[in-house]
Image (cartoon, helix red, strand yellow):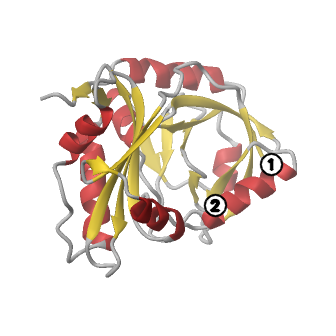
């Protein structure tokens, strides 16, 4: 099931073609449950930041929660992606809301991850320039890995391909990398419900961690079995902490 609207109206072929062929714009992705979203205000803040950066002269059309409600129609549970796309002048913008089946809430298997040096452009934004990260994911999979973890040229751990990394150190502290990266909405929600710290982490620091996991809108706590062959004995403890924190997250109703 996929339903797409532009500014609250059925999507035209011209706008869909523009979305598919222009490597410019930004978006946010969320899971809707019972017509509510965890971290809704954070999603809206992300969209405002993206528009202020990529479309500083544009008045982005529409009330975003209303556009989401309209695209959902009578659905209670769904996956929703809100994208802000350029018009022909690259200065004004349209809002595309895509609704598809909800992602199952079941746990996912542990990942074996390869660390690589790669820095996304405008790392603070969730933007559409994804060719580089997709290439590296596919290259890693062809070599027997499941995904990639990015390090900057400064040697600091940043983020995964489409997820934030989180670790458990030897003292039992939940640790987030501190570096230029996208702070995911799920990561922000978890931080509000789980004692943790953020600090710069090198590859050597990561190799000394007891647990490792990924977190994004599809899964708040997917275990990482190994990074570059380094295994993490207490990952189950970390994912249990993350899932408990997620269970206590506040879900903001769209119908308000």
Of the pair 99 and 35, the residue shown nearer to us: 99
Q: Find residue 39 and report its image quarter.
A: top left
Pointer 2 residue: 133
Quarter of the C terminus within the rendering: top left
Residue density around tag 1, few if under 14, some if 14–19, many if 20 or more, within 10 Å: some
Of the pair 227 and 127, the residue shown nearer to us: 127
At a point 28% along the width and 73% down the height, the residue shown is 55
Residue 141: give its label: 1
- The vertical placement of 151 against 92, above or below, is above
Residue density around tag 2, few if under 14, some if 14–19, many if 20 or more, within 10 Å: some
State left or right for residue 39 relative to residue 20.
left
State left or right for residue 151 relative to residue 92.
right
At a point 29% along the width and 24% down the height, the residue shown is 74
Q: Secondary structure at mark 2?
A: helix
Circles 1 and 2: CB atoms closer than 8 Å: no
- The vertical placement of 168 against 14, above or below, is above
At a point 60% along the width and 32% down the height, the residue shown is 170
Q: Farthest left residue?
A: 256
Q: Residue 6, image x and y in percent?
A: 31, 54
Of the pair 30 and 235, the residue shown nearer to us: 30
Task: Confirm whether residue 34 shows in the render.
Answer: yes
Q: Residue 48, image x and y in percent?
A: 24, 58
Q: Farthest right residue?
A: 143
Task: Confirm whether residue 124 shows in the render.
Answer: no
Mark 1 vs mark 2, CA separation in Å: 12 Å
């Amino acid at each position: 099931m996929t339903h797409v609207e532009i500014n609250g109206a059925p999507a035209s072929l011209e706008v869909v073609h523009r979305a598919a062929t222009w490597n410019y714009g930004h978006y946010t992705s969320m899971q809707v449950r019972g017509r509510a979203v965890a971290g809704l205000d954070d999603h809206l803040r992300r969209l405002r930041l993206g528009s202020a950066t990529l479309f500083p002269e544009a008045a982005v059309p529409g009330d975003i929660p209303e556009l989401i409600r309209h695209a959902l129609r009578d659905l209670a549970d769904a996956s929703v992606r809100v994208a802000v796309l350029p018009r022909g002048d690259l200065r004004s913008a349209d809002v595309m809301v895509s609704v598809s089946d909800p992602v199952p809430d079941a746990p996912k298997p542990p990942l074996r991850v390869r660390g690589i040096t790669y820095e996304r452009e405008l790392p603070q934004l969730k933007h559409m320039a994804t060719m580089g990260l997709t290439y590296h994911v596919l290259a890693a999979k062809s070599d027997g890995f499941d995904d990639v973890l990015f390090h900057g040229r400064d040697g600091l751990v940043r983020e995964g391909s489409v997820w934030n990394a989180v670790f458990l150190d030897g003292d039992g502290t939940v640790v987030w990398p501190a570096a230029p990266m996208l702070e995911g909405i799920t990561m922000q929600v978890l931080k509000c419900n789980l004692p943790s710290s953020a600090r710069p982490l090198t590859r050597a620091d990561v190799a000394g961690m007891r647990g490792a996991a990924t977190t994004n809108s599809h899964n708040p706590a997917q275990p990482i079995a190994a990074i570059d062959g380094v295994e993490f004995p207490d990952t189950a403890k970390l994912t249990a902490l993350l899932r408990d924190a997620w269970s206590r997250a506040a879900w903001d109703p769209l119908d308000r």
